[in-house]
Amino acid sequence: MKLKFNPVLLLGLLFPFSNCQNDNHSEIPHDTAFYIDYRSLDGKSDGIAVIELDPEAPNFGNISSKLELGVGVLPHHLYYNQNANKLYSTALGGSYLYQIKTEKDKNGQPILVAATPINTGENTVGENLFFTNDGRFFMTFMGGAGGPKDGSIGVFNANNNQLIKTIKAPIQDNPNKFIMYPHGISVNEEKGLMMVTSTIHPDLTTGMGNTTTLLDINTYELKETYQVADSKTDLSAPVEVLLLRGKFPQFALATTMLGGDIWIAPYNATTKKYDAFSKIFDGSTQGLGWTLEMYIDDNNRLYVSFADPGKVLVFDISNLPQLKLLKTLTADKGAHHMVFFKTKKGKDAVAVQNNLLNIPNLNSGTISVIEISTGKTLGTVDLRTKYGILPESIEGTNGPSSYMHH
């Protein structure tokens, strides 16, 4: 979820990753239950589930509620809106975007009730969302209208989910300013800027990108397309981008899926754009590849997942553009999205969803629960073996389970 300083999280922000928890866990019995998007491995419906992820809980790893979306829907990313009172899931198939209705049972446990498809117009292959404070949300569509070098950004009314506008800028029209295969998205509302990545064609073979593009969030004008690669022919596939904002140093960060690296660009107050990107971390020097997600806590720590071989690296970003590696956490192959919480005994933990699009060797199908301070694996849920499903993404049931994500 792309978060700004959300009033829903005020209590949680006092303690990083506390997920707005109350010290008396009996008052909020689902603190350690999480939503997951999942794909079926046996031809059944894909969907969303509620799963317990506290290794100290007797029902650790158990699914308590499921909502089927349909065969081949491939739900992909879970997001809360700006006020954390609506839950959404993007999807690579089906209707591409759904609003999810949830309720609580008599014990306060979350239950998945229904999914309402949202009309995305001609836009296909739903990826990331970003909700802004002015009642809009932006969505990247890696498939665009379906062309070999397509891709688009949908602008929606967050109150009624209506599509307001589709932003398209084909590379064929302007090879210097374009939108193609957009996946990652981040917005700095104070600066009126949005950036999206150019990742890969949805079929994973037709084409790949190596750029990010900066846009004005009010005029939708493209301001610049940046190379995020070692050369024009280096198809690094930038996957996520994060425009740091608020109290954090004003830089743009990007991860490259096929490059396996982290890149950085400083904000330029004169041009009101970002300067060129440069590589700040080379994954290959550490035996790492397939760099994916970025999360930031309240103490200037950056958590980055590397799907190969399945690690989460924790960096200090206090002195950007210097990036200081603090620790490495071991997950499983396909390490991807994360949620942060306290166990019932008060341990600060991160749960890592280990699967990337069921790509061979990057699809463990597990969720690793790791104690942040020690790096110890507290528990692992094998969804492939236990349920015949693969987790696609993960989110909290009490609201966003991270401080800042994109």
Image (spheres, helix red, strand yellow):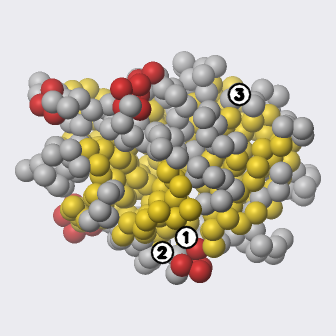
Label 3: element kind: loop
Question: Residue 38, how many percent across, how many down?
Answer: 35, 54
Question: Residue 171, how many percent across, how many down?
Answer: 85, 56
Q: Are marks 1 and 2 in contact (CB under 8 Å)?
A: yes
Q: Is residue 344 above or below residue 183?
A: above
Cα separation between marks 3 and 1: 31 Å
Amino acid on which disc 3 is placed: Glu
| Residue in front for this viewpoint, 127 or 260 | 260
Upstream in the sequence, badge 3 or badge 1? 3
Upstream in the sequence, badge 1 or badge 2? 1
x 83%, y 71%: residue: 232
Amino acid on which disc 1 is placed: Trp
Instruction: Describe residue 231's horizontal placement relative to residue 153 as left or right.
Output: right
Cα separation between marks 1 and 2: 6 Å
Residue 308 is tagged as: 2
- Residue wearing tag 3: 190
Determine the image quadrant of residue 353: bottom left
